[in-house]
Amino acid sequence: MSVRTLSITAQSVSFAPMEGKPNKPVLIVAGPTASGKSALALAVAEAFDGVVINADSMQVYAELRILTARPSARDEARVAHRLYGVLPVTEVCSAARWREMAVAAIAEAHDAGRLPIVCGGTGLYLRALMQGLSPIPEIPEDIRRDVRARLDREGPAAQHARLAACDPETAERLEPGDRQRVARALEVLAGTGRPLSEWLALPPEGPPPDMRFEVLLLTPPREPLYAACDERLLDMVRAGALEEVERLRQDGTDPSLPAMRALGMPVFLQHQSGELGLEEAIDLAQLATRRYAKRQMTWFRNQIISNFVVNEQYSEKFEPEIFAFIRQNLLTKPN
């Protein structure tokens, strides 16, 4: 049996303190799905009196513990976890909404003298926290409902064509079937009178000025990562993921909601309605998970500056190097 050699890359990135502001450290634990982020964040939190703060767009939903591989109740009892299962599936968690909750959770950890550990693989959320967001005003709920009702009546293709007539730059980068993002672009246009592309061209509001981010990134090789994705999907099914999906189906949850596009959800809904056999649904869910992991890896390579990279699946054997990095760069002492 071959043993893969650990490859760790440490990068030096300077964070200059803001004049008159405290320089509060925040550890970001990032990586693709099934790379071991949650286990690593848990180990760091135990060693450094930390608080684990969720940065996964689907793990915020209360009804999706199994399907989204949220930390177990036992793990949540070992260390403090924040922003896991805090919203019902009927609500929409935008990057702006998550950022507001995350900043509050980080401040709470700092006030308690604890290390905030932001853990997740949703690149948009991490970028919103570390780089800021374009200053798009909050869109009134009645406008959001009207846009989505029109989308349901007329279909995504017609609404994409409508977007193309008003905001061709945004329409060009969106697939016609991307209901959520097409709806978001139309909401912004209806709510502000300006196309989304104009808002995105404005300088972002910037990150919280008193926070200093250190990014620890897991980037496993493709073969073991894909194997981990496949095995975890099977574990979810064994643990009751199909029952989670069935409860939402029986409740008549709106299939256009973001939570209903969680990995595995669409094909498991098809299975529950008799359109797909279980084996085919599992195969398709595994394929979707592997493709998502690949997109995440591409995003992290191109969009995020990492201070410390572990080019392997997380394992306890890497903890000495990781913990040494944390001690040196986040100035946090273990218990």
Image: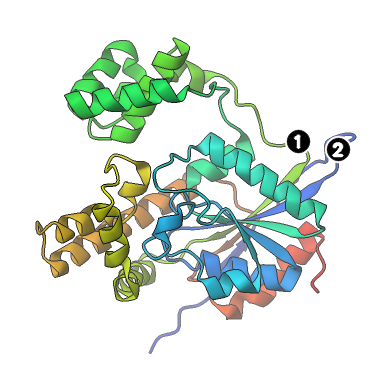
Residue receiving disc 1: 209
Quarter of the image that includes the C terminus: bottom right
Please tell me in which quadrant of the rendered image residue 237 appears: bottom left
Which residue lies at the image location 21% right of the left edge and 55% below the top edge?
Answer: 269
Residue 64: % across, % down: 40, 58
- Mark 1 Cα-neighbour bin, 10 Å: few <14, some 14–19, many ≥20: few
Please, which residue is most extreme toward the bottom here? 1
Residue 251: numbered disc = none
| Label 1 element class | loop
Crowding near pointer 2: few (<14 within 10 Å), some, many (20+)? few
- Relative placement, left or right, of 178 versus 57 is left
Going 18% across and 62% down the picture, which residue do you hit?
281
Residue denoted by label 2: 21
Amino acid at the residue labelled 1: Pro
Q: Is residue 305 left or right of residue 256?
A: right
Quadrant of image for the N terminus: bottom left
**What is the three-letter code of the residue carrying label 2?**
Lys
* Residue 322 position (above or below residue 91): below
Question: Which of marks 2 and 1 precedes in the sequence?
Answer: 2
Distance CA(mark 1)–CA(mark 2):
8 Å
Image coords of residue 190 (percent x, y): 39, 14
Residue at the spot x=39%, y=66% of the render?
66
